[in-house]
Amino acid sequence: MTKDAANPTCLADYEALAAQALNPKTWAYVQSGAADQHTFARNQQAFADIRLVPRHLCSMQGGHTALELFGTTFDYPILIAPVAYQRLAHPDGEQATVLAASAMRAGMVVSTLSSMPLEDLAQASSTPLWFQLYLQADKADSLALMRRTEAAGYGAIVVTIDAALNGCRNAEQRAGFTLPDAISAVNLNGQRIAAQAMSIAAGESLFQSQHAARFHGWDDIEWVIQQSRRPVLVKGIMSPHDARRAVQAGAAGLLVSNHGGRVLDTVPATIEVLPAIMDAAGNTPVLLDGGIRRGTDVLKALALGAKAVLLGRPIIHGLAVNGPSGVAHVLHILRTEFEMAMMLCGCKTLADIDRSVIWPPDASPRLTSKSSLDA
């Protein structure tokens, strides 16, 4: 770590330092959103637009942040989101992140596109691991991945549904990013998946291209749930329609996510759609990622119904700046900020967090047009 990086105090500090630590092409890949990056920016701004209600003179003795998800107890409701190719940020890649997660007792979701073998990560971990599954063209390949994760001890499958296409990541295109030869999707037999935005030949329709074949159906999700020996969460839920469909398919949990604003621009922030997703989810647990940068963001997400949140880019920022120590510090900062926010809003446990901490009481972010959400 450089001398200037000796004392980052918040996640924004780590972001600024990571921009210096990574080469410009890699930074463009890590940091860019789709198209004009409106959704990428909105994910954070929507949290800032929500106001909290402080409450004072509340006893905090015996307080804690523990929760149970799918039969596993977590110390606090902040998990590491699945992020591909982490060796772009540090030579030890996902192994360094697993080390930090274990030290901080934080749950971690390992990506299908991990740059290190999923079995090695499980062996190095002393914290709960879940596996993020990208459905493969051949069901046999998807099933093989699921069986490997089960044998390695992963506790859940998180199947991503929102990234059949990479999206128009123009900043990444302008930078000319390509995946280095030494980094590949090792869990997919070393395939080097194209990391930059896709392109098609002039005059060719996208609907007639090979990319259209990447789209799966709800029958594929039902198949995963039927085949899995672990709870299955569906990641990429942004509409009540999809939330209800995932519940009908038998999903154990839903993950509200717009892929960090990297796929389709101008969709709402995840925190904006969360209340409508909660209405559609019934008793199915809902988690959220996208735009979490402060402990107050975690509190707001839980106040609007989420059971836990996942942290993506800030983990990579910490990894780029100072390896496993940087990741651990990012987690420590966010957990401490979250506990401070809880205490200042009069919440001794997670069960005390509800909409009463949001001001005004009817100001929870919600799209006004129900039909636009159900489309």
Image: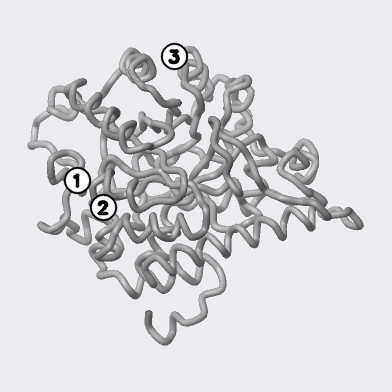
Say which label, 3 or 1, has the lower sequence index: 1
For image coordinates 25% across by 24% down, the residue present is 143
For image coordinates 39% across by 54% down, the residue present is 98
Name which residue type carries label 1. Ala
The answer to whether residue 72 is seen in the rendering is: yes
Between residue 57 and residue 35, name the one nearer to us: 57
Pointers 2 and 1 in contact (CB under 8 A)? yes
Give the residue number, with chain letter if any, for mark 2.
85
Examine the rendered structure and indicate whether residue 264 appears above or below residue 75: above
Give the residue number, with chain letter if any, for mark 3.
249
Give the residue number, with chain letter if any, for mark 1.
185
Q: Position of residue 121 (x, y in %)?
A: 32, 49
For image coordinates 74% across by 42% down, the residue present is 353
Which mark identifies residue 137? Answer: none
Tell me if 363 is positioned left or right of 373 in this view: right
Q: CA distance from mark 2 to mark 3?
A: 30 Å
Pointers 2 and 3 in contact (CB under 8 A)? no
Say which label, 2 or 3, has the lower sequence index: 2
Check disc 3: other Cα within 10 Å, few if <14, some if 14-19, many if 20+: some
Tell me if 59 is positioned left or right of 119 in this view: right
For image coordinates 28% across by 44% down, the residue present is 118
Q: CA distance from mark 2 to mark 1?
A: 7 Å
Name which residue type carries label 2. Tyr
Examine the rendered structure and indicate whether residue 134 appears above or below residue 242: below
